[in-house]
Amino acid sequence: HNFLVKDVNDVVNTVFKAVKIATTGRPGPVLIDLPKDVQLAKAPYHKIKPHLPSYTPPKHLNQPAIEKAAEMIKMARKPVFYTGGGIINAGPEATETLRKLVDATGIPITTTLMGLGSIAGDHPRFLGMLGMHGTYEANLAMHDCDLMICIGARFDDRVTGRVDAFSPHSKKIHIDIDPSSINKNIQIDLGIVGDANAVMTE
């Protein structure tokens, strides 16, 4: 997002907007660049109540897509969960739901660096972290799976390596709160936009 500021009050509002963007939905870094003349400017203080648009994930989940995902999981012979920081950001309930889902399905699970802690390190289905700093088992499972269920991760290059050689024979389900992440780095077969806990629960 780019915000053009006109006065000191606009600066304050812009900072509030930046904090909102950085801490809600899919949290991430925000750069606030204030020119030197703005930093040195003097102005009377006015208490303001900034107007902040609230972030809200979709109110209604795509039920047909969730049913299709369940069918794909049922038909898979070598599925793998690939989870990321989105599970952590979704809160403690999401980590508990993830554990229940892994226990119920028996599907092995890998995590990104940001997803570590979403499942116990000694869980019998946990293969370790994946990617260039991950375990051999996790990377081999991802490469050879027939269904990859990505929850709250973004297929970054530390995980995928060469995109054309990344899990070439698998179908891919991607669950993310941010619609812009779906099909951004890797072409997937089924995308579901929504809060990780809500989608896993369904």
Image (spheres, rainbow, N blue to C red):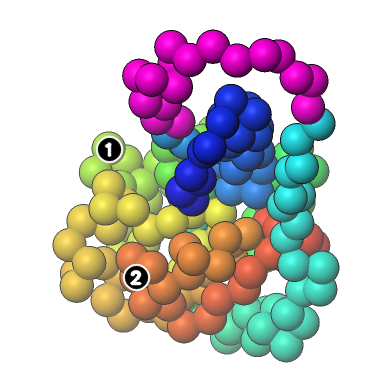
* Residue drawn at the location 62% of the way across and 59% of the way down: 177
Q: Nearer the viewer, residue 83 or 2?
A: 2
Kind of residue sitting beneath label 2: Ile
Residue 21 drawn in magenta: no
Please identify the quarter of the rendering in which residue 169 is found: bottom left
Q: Position of residue 79 (x, y in %)?
A: 50, 70
Closer to the chain start, of discs 2 and 1, is 1
Q: Nearer the viewer, residue 146 or 111?
A: 111
Above or below residue 71? Residue 144 is above
Q: Which residue is mark 1?
A: 133
* Residue drawn at the location 60% of the way across and 42% of the way down: 21
Please provide the residue range marked out in magenta.
32-48
The circle on residue 186 is 2
State the quadrant of the C terminus.
Answer: bottom right
Q: Is residue 94 visible?
A: no
Q: Position of residue 43 (x, y in %)?
A: 60, 15
Above or below residue 44? Residue 88 is below
* Residue drawn at the location 75% of the way across and 67% of the way down: 58
Above or below residue 26? Residue 170 is below
Kind of residue sitting beneath label 1: His
Tag count: 2
How far apart are labels 2 and 1 at the CA level? 20 Å
> Mark 2, mark 1: which one is toward the viewer?
2
Please identify the quarter of the rendering in which residue 10 is found: top right
